[in-house]
Amino acid sequence: MKDVFGGLEAYKESRNFHASLAWLSDGDLLSDLGVHGNGLGGTWSAILKSMVSCTEGREFQCKLKCGFDRNPGKVEMYIPLYKEPLLMGYIMMQPVKNYLLGYRTVFNVEDREFNMHAFCGGFSNDVTEVGLKLENFETLRGSIFQRIGEKWAVALKANLYGNVSAKSVSIGGQYEWEPGSMLKAKVRGDSRIGLIFQKKLRDDIEVLFHVGFEGSDPINGKHKFGSSWYFNM
């Protein structure tokens, strides 16, 4: 209860354009100006993302997010324009049905060095999702999401190689009793437990509540409480 953080965002769409403006309780202002369309047999998009930080004086940052999606692949990039140090991007391909391959990279423009190389592979259908990710040729992460019937699902995520420990394991589950209404639970290897309740009150109103605490000491340990509301007017 020592830290309180929040924000408010307004979003507007008109044909192929959209704009958003967000205010965060620490004083930061974020804005998006975006456009999307069809071309070259696929779908393209471009979003100008800006931030004015008021934490220490006033500082302006700006980057461009652009992407192109055409079967069987998709590309997205974040291009730094002003006081943004990182050039980021990924490419994803679907060589055959239900299987995905991807590569993600992060390049520090100021230091002129790569911060990350990640190679990914996955399988997905209506019931099962399996993913593998190799980061910087050092750490291999894996995850599996399995639906059990129409309402239940379980998930497991862990480091399989490099930096392997009990703390890197997460187990979760969810129950969806009706469309838009769901209860989720997650347990991490460091005993952190999280609970999420989300509910679609109406077609234009959605709400989400989150509670997090330490399973080893649920009374005196650290607690987190969160809530978000979505209004479509």
Image: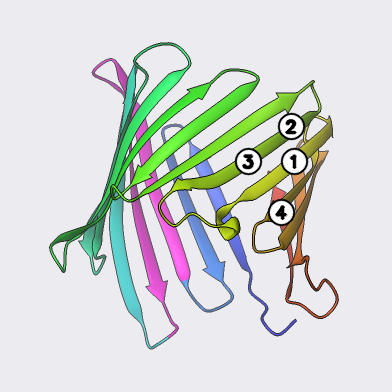
Looking at the image, residue 212 sits to the left or right of residue 47; the answer is right
Disc 3/disc 4 C-alpha distance (Å)? 10 Å
Residue kind at label 3, given as amino acid type: Leu
According to the image, label 4 marks what residue?
187
Q: Name the residue rendered at 17%, 62% in the picture.
A: 109
According to the image, label 2 marks what residue?
153
Other residues around mark 1 within 10 Å, as few (<14) / some (14–19) / many (≥20): some
Q: Earlier in the sequence, mark 2 or mark 1?
A: 2
Q: In the rendered image, which quarter is residue 232 located in?
A: top right
Disc 2/disc 1 C-alpha distance (Å)? 6 Å
Q: Earlier in the sequence, mark 4 or mark 2?
A: 2
Q: Is residue 70 magenta?
A: no
Quadrant holding the N terminus: bottom right
Query: In terms of secondary structure, where does tag 1 sit?
Result: strand
Residue kind at label 4, given as amino acid type: Val
In the rendered structure, find residue 156 and report the number of the disc placed on it.
3
Disc 2/disc 3 C-alpha distance (Å)? 11 Å
Query: In terms of secondary structure, where does tag 4 sit?
Result: strand
